[in-house]
Amino acid sequence: MDFELSEEHKLLRKTTRKFAEEVIRPAAQEYDESAKYPYEIVEQAKKLDLIAPALPVEYGGAGMDFLAQAIVIEELFRGDAGIGSAISARPFGSDMLLEFGTDAQKKKYLLPVGRGDWVMGSAITEPEAGSDVASMKTRAEKKGSEYVINGAKMFITNGTIANFLIVFARTTMNPPERHMGITAFVVESDRKGYIAEPLKKKMGIRASDLAEITLKDVRVPEENIIGQLDMGFYQLMQFFGRGRVAIGAQAVGIAQGAFDEAFKYAQERQTFGRPIVDFQAIQFKLADMATDIEAARLLTYKGAWLVSQGGNPAREASMAKLFASRVAREVANEALQIHGGYGYIKEYPVERFYRDAKITELYEGTSEIQRLIIIRSLLGKI
Ligand SMILES: Cc1cc2nc3c(=O)[nH]c(=O)nc-3n(C[C@H](O)[C@H](O)[C@H](O)COP(=O)(O)OP(=O)(O)OC[C@H]3O[C@@H](n4cnc5c(N)ncnc54)[C@H](O)[C@@H]3O)c2cc1C
């Protein structure tokens, strides 16, 4: 792989970085404290075409490759993970619609999302089914030409603000294989029986919307099925690689943002008559942090590049996510340590990076699940 970015990628990085520094970072503390969704900043991101970098132009996206998407995510999260998430998760699940949606579905749902006018989300997790996706209990029963959906979904990004969600529900009970019998549906949030309960009290990425969703006799027409009946789990698995590379990019951005703060602070803060960056203990910390970030970035870019080549790199994506998320947590921790007691109060952004970093080890599959995928891949089982 050639690690030199193209001129197009470099320009995109420069534009996104400028936006993150000038617009996102100054607003980060306010949105973190209020846990409000940053509508005004999203409007500005829309003008710069940063909402859906890799979605084709015909569906309102910027028509770039997946490496471009990773670069945008990294730079947004370097500015602030909460606002970065609010912007970059607006098309969450659009890959599924692009690949398996009918032309009519793409025109109706994907286009307004790509343009940045609509928000979508993906509802997979349930109160009792997280890592074990196939154990989901939400049911969709066929009644005439409609499906009636009942169940509960937990931790749904964009759940209270989305125009629609892709909801995964069981359509066949007791299938011959436990991963079968799950189907993906478009469920518009204005349908009767769609109830969103906001989850505001989260540790980090607080500007990002999160909800618990109850679906009570929600009726959707048959044409809201995405792809094939009963094959939703397998359809979903095709996109986890992309999603995990994206989380790798989030983690690299958070780690870099925390590093920037620590690097600056270490040159300003004086103890024993010298800036603390003069002490070798601090120098070695910074050197290790910079090295880890660069390694995480290269793994993530490799995953993104493989996706851009048209692949679904399960192993590389899991490696990128596993490694980059650990680096984000450890670098944020060291960055806070370099700030001493000042790192522990909210006037300094570093404590926010510390809280935000943790999510990257949890969603799109926990670190334990990434390890399971990596070892299964090494053993030739997937
Ligand atoms: C902020 C946020 C946003 C989210 N957004 C979405 C979203 O938009 N859509 C969506 O569907 N979900 C979303 N999620 C849910 C997220 O993907 C799940 O929380 C995650 O997959 C873990 O599931 P769980 O919480 O049920 O943990 P569990 O599956 O209950 O796991 C608990 C612990 O056990 C470990 N574990 C489980 N099974 C194994 C095993 N076989 N071997 C070893 N260890 C194991 C896990 O790693 C973890 O440490 C979000 C979560 C958060 C916090």
Image (tube, grey):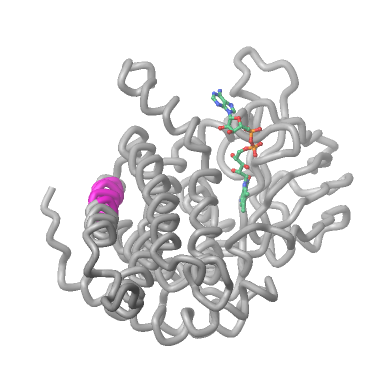
x, y percent for residue 314: 37, 35
x, y percent for residue 354: 50, 59
x, y percent for residue 189: 76, 60
Q: Quadrant of ligand 1?
A: top right
Task: Residue 159: name its quadrant.
Answer: bottom right
Camera-side residue of 297 and 175: 297
Write the residue at 17% across / 64% down: 5
Write the residue at 27% across / 57% down: 281
> Does residue 60 sit above or below 169 in this rendering?
below
Q: Which residues are magenta?
A: 292-304
Q: Is residue 189 left or right of residue 288?
A: right
Q: Is residue 5 left or right of residue 336?
A: left
Residue 365 in view of the camera: yes
Camera-side residue of 356 and 241: 356
x, y percent for residue 237: 48, 35
> Does residue 325 sit above or below 365 in this rendering?
below
Which secondary structure is most common in the magenta stretch? helix
Q: Is residue 308 left or right of residue 241?
A: left
Camera-side residue of 97 and 127: 127
